[in-house]
Amino acid sequence: MLNYAMKKIAFTVLVLFGAATISFVLLHAIPGDTAQALAGPQAAAADVENLRRALNLDAPYGEQYLNYMGNLLKGNLGHSYRSNKPVMEIVAAAWPATLQLAACSMLVAIIIGLPIGIFAAVKRGRIGDTIAMVVSFIGVSMPSFWLALLLIMLFSVKLELLPFYGIVGPTSFILPALTLGSSTAANIARLTRTSMLEILGQDYIRTARGKGLQDQRVIWLHALRNAAVPILTIIGLQFGVMLGGQVVTETVFSWPGVGRMIVDALDSRDLQIVQGGILILAFTFAVINLVTDLLYALLDPRIRY
């Protein structure tokens, strides 16, 4: 188990190194002059050049990359070009809101998707199975921004029941969590159905039923436990996707998280904040995948061997 964990940790480090490198290359390939954007359209050429020199933006990309990676190894994400605050401080202020929203969204997805998938598997080939899969298909197909606008129009504008701007209380989590959790719930339902159908056809399930065990006990205790590995896979991956894919949802709901922070930083070409936000999200995603892999080994001992 220790060797398995060490291999996964080493792979996670490589993933983070790749994410840092790719984000640096792509952001510096974006057209436009960072110094000009920071100085403003009315700034004189000499002022722009002085700013470029002060921020070390006139150095070759190779030198900038080595400086950036060297600072990362020291735990330093740099400073914001605009506010001169440490990027770590800015990201740390926004990250909890993103993590809280992702956790609430995943909770919604599990509460909705898992029972639907189990129900569809138990009712295989019946009308209930068909309805469950149609609902799942609709959930996967709906764009998040469109669903967000529908929820806002219904629950905030017409019914005036829920807030839709920022965080003003616990009820602020409901609409964005439903928006993010709906597509994930659909994915969980579909995979749960497929995995449960495979397990329900096994001999030991028929044996358990032949012994007179209650059907609910067979489904929830025996079948679901053995179907948990692929379900855990989709939950872990989707949780990582939620953390990194909240940009649209956070923008629509004015959520003070990392996604909206990255959008605002891109508008102002504050690349240090963008790089820091991307790296934190990549780190969180990698850690979640690492924990998921370790849970695989605990659920199924064959994996670690």
Image (tube, rainbow, N blue to C red):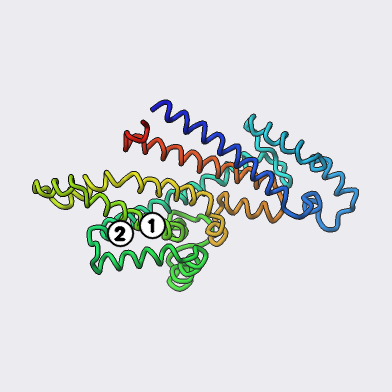
What number is the disc on residue 239?
Answer: none
Q: Nearer the viewer, residue 118 or 48?
A: 118
Q: Residue at x 60, y 37 (%)?
A: 17
The picture places residue 154, in percent across and down from the top left corner, at: 44, 71
Q: Amino acid at mark 1?
A: Ala
Q: Earlier in the sequence, mark 2 or mark 1?
A: 2
Rendered view: 153 above or below 290 = below
Query: Which corner quadrant holds the N terminus?
Result: top left
Q: Amino acid at mark 2?
A: Ile
Q: Nearer the viewer, residue 138 or 8?
A: 8
Q: Residue furthest top?
A: 2
Q: Residues within 10 Å of mark 2 (few under 14, many from 20)?
A: many
Q: Are marks 2 and 1 in contact (CB under 8 Å)?
A: yes
What number is the disc on residue 185?
Answer: 1
Q: Secondary structure at mark 1?
A: helix
Rendered view: 73 above or below 48 = above
The picture places residue 289, in percent across and down from the top left corner, at: 46, 41
The picture places residue 270, in percent across and down from the top left corner, at: 71, 48
Q: Residue at x 75, y 55 (%)?
A: 31
Rendered view: 42 above or below 65 = below
Q: Secondary structure at mark 2?
A: helix
Query: Which corner quadrant holds the C terminus?
Result: top left
Taking 261 as reference, is 245 left or right? left
Q: Nearer the viewer, residue 150 or 31?
A: 31
| Tag count | 2
What number is the disc on residue 116?
Answer: 2
Q: Residue furthest bottom?
A: 158
